[in-house]
Image (cartoon, coloured by chain):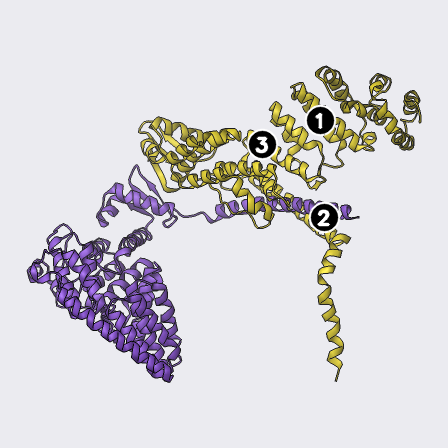
Amino acid sequence: MQSVENLVTQIQGLSSSASDISVLHNFLKAADDSLRSETPRLLPFLDQLDPSKHSLGYLYFLEPCVYVTVTKERANTLVPIIARFITSCVAEQIRLAPEKFITVCRRFKEQVMLLEVPIRGVGPLLTAIHKIQASTEHLTALHPEFLQLCLLSKCYKTGLSVLEDDIYEVNQPRDFFLYCYYGGMIFIGQKRFQKALELLHNVVTAPMSSINAIACEAYKKYILVSLIHHGQFSTNLPKYTSSAAQRNLKNFCQFYIELANNYNSGKVAELETYVRVNREKFESDNNLGLVKQVISSMYKRNIQRLTQTYLTLSLQDIANTVQLNSPKEAEMHVLQMIQDGQIYATINQKDGMVRFLEDPEQYKTCEMIEHIDSSIQRIMALSKKLTGMDELLSCDPLYLAKAGRERQRFDFDDFDTVPQKFNI
Amino acid sequence: MEAEDEQSNAMMDEIYSNGGEESERSRPIISGEQLDIEAYASLYQGRTKITRLLFIADHCDNVSMRLEALRMAYDEIKKGENTQLLREVVQKIDGRLGPNYAMDAAWCESVDRRAEQRKEKLENELNAYRTNLIKESIRMGYNDFGDFYYAHGALGDAFKSYVRTRDYCTTSKHIIHMCMSAILVSIEMGQFTHVTSYVSKAEQTPEALEPATVAKLRCAAGLAHLEAKKYKLAARKFLEVGPDLVNSYNEVIAPQDVATYGGLCALASFDRAELKSKVIDNVSFRNFLELVPEVRELINDFYSSHYASCLDYLGNLKANLLLDIHLHDHVETLYDQIRNKALIQYTHPFVSVDLNMMANAFKTTVAGIQKELEALITDNQIQARIDSHNKILYARHADQRNATFQRVLQTGNEFDRDVRAMLLRTNLLKHDYNQRNCRKL
């Protein structure tokens, strides 16, 4: 057992080369328990260490400190220390003890929440993710924490920078569920419903042996977003969905499915009454805002449908068919939709006529070609990945063992028939 | 009927000579004109005549017609042995037809008594046959029971008795007889699923069927499809009915009905080519159509695109078709389908159509036609868009190139999304599997 002072000097001495650090790591592992018992004394020693040089040692000293139950005052002193550590630490060193680093970051997040300043955690956590991540395809335990902070501090844009990387490697299913759920909410906040739908879809269809609350909430949002974005919702889940989800999700989201049914009937008034009656339910789920967006999307959907049918239509007629109160209101809706690029139309204010046009996109421009080309590249890369994955899987001993076990009884027959043929 | 005839034009006169159910003319505006019940009823015999008359009595708004139908039903019932039906009819008449049509308790009693005796006799006979185990006799016994129940209105029991004969059938002739009886009773009961199954049973018999039987089976199958709202199949069946039907099946259906049902179903569900080849050029069906010239005319009008006169005919026929026991529930749907078909066909050849002209052709207002077109366009049945400012309908020609581009990009995106989701799920599964393995170790 070494004294803490001794350890500090060792850390200072053994933090330069890679081989030294691995030696140090062994020392630290051995001293971990004693460090834990010395917890109250550790904090002052941190001043003697430089987080940018002695990252590993710093981490071992810091980690026991965060286990102590935190008060506000203590959090106030700890938060800047941890933030400084996260920003200046060396990635190679902390990756030797990822669990400790993640614990520190988690505690950091809790303290930031305790101080009710989530925005202070956004920057450090983003740095932390980049440092601990082996590649951008890996999902770390810090992803959901980071996204939650983004949501709480409304820094949606910062969250996007992480969400834009495609995730393939997952260690903890729970992290994945939360990541997709928070990610979906961030995309909803940015009104990028297509992406939000994709993430929520991932939650709902993810393999699970029993239903969980995250999937339930995600399914509620999935229903609403799919109504807003596609204007329709089908209760049939794809057949790769786990049977637990297929059996149970609908029962937990009855009100939302009712809402979708009301939506499908196409009558705004009915939908509005339904929402009014069940307002509290949606409010308690914190989904009332989305529900309101569903209602307004219905007007848009109905106007969009008119463009399929009419070349010209007066604002009065639009107001009548879409059940808006006045031509003025209809004009606002149409204008808004033209601005958003949802319909192509011109409004003639003189006689109150709206002229619907066809989609002017002719697929002839250079930008379009570039867009198509980039799509092709993307898909080629993706299918390469798919092949790689397939090859990897077909070499996976676990998979082969399972597949082989199932095939055995056929093999027996295969061998047996051969000699019989020659039996005369 | 004669009085009404005079208002009709020459062509109509020709119709009347046939005395078909649609043969009187009723312009909907003239409420006094009505179905000639006597001529209508004379087309049928047996139980269906009574039920059809009662159906008219239930569904007609005209009081004198109702009473007329009830009176004839009363007379008809008196010829049979169904006392239950008589009581119902008397209740419906409610003394409005004078003392001659009041409750005849004596008749009921004597009929009931006779029925009781006959039933006893039949039971004894059947028991005797059964102890002797003579197959043919047992079959006859059950058959007699079926006839007996049928005559007395116990349709369920009749059906059971007829079906029971099946175990004792020795020749395909017997089987067909059993099937025909079962079909007859099922139609009366409104159990059209039974009808379908017994029709197919009868058609499966190894021996070649008589043409008249084939025609009857086609009619029954057609009715079953009609009730199941499968109008296209119904039309096919009715169109296949051979000329041998004549009046042989009028305990169920009259040849006039075959023409009407078949014609309307065909109009509602066939496309132009099929209409031409299977209806207009169909020699045997033409004979049926001759019986109901209005239907023939309206089919020809439809085919030659005289929609206004076609719709006129349809409008005139409607009141009477609504009084038809089988067609009643389907008239509205069939009419809607025919009208939609007409609208689609009308717009099909044009690049642009003036809505005013179109409204004229279909005898409606511009706003009305706009509404109908809107529904059809939304349903994607017409590829066109309405210029509601100038009241012109423009056909819309899909730009193949743009559509292809759009679809390609969309498919690409979907593929992208699906594959990524799939990879993720695979990794999750793998993780789950790995973890379970770790736990085992």
Q: Farthest residue in the top direction?
A: A73
Above or below, A366 against B144 in this view is: above
Left or right of B79 on screen, residue B300: right
Q: Within 10 angstroms of label 1, few (less than 14), some, or many (20 or more) residues? A: many
Decide: marks 2, 1 in contact (CB < 8 A)? no
Chain of the residue where label 2 is placed in the rendered structure: B
Above or below, B437 against B277 in this view is: above
Report the amino acid beneath label 3.
Met
Q: Residue at x 23, y 43 (%)?
A: B365
Q: CA distance from mark 2 to mark 1?
A: 30 Å
Q: Tell me the mark number nearer the camera, choosing from 2 and 3.
A: 2
Q: CA distance from mark 3 to mark 1?
A: 19 Å
Left or right of B322 on screen, residue A313: right
* Residue position for label 3: A185
Q: Tell me the mark number nearer the camera, choosing from 2 and 1.
A: 2
Chain of the residue where label 1 is placed in the rendered structure: A
> At which x and y percent is residue A220?
53, 37
Give the structural element (helix, strand or loop) at label 2. Answer: helix
Give the structural element (helix, strand or loop) at label 1. Answer: helix
* Residue position for label 2: B433
Task: Give the drawing colour for chain B.
Answer: purple
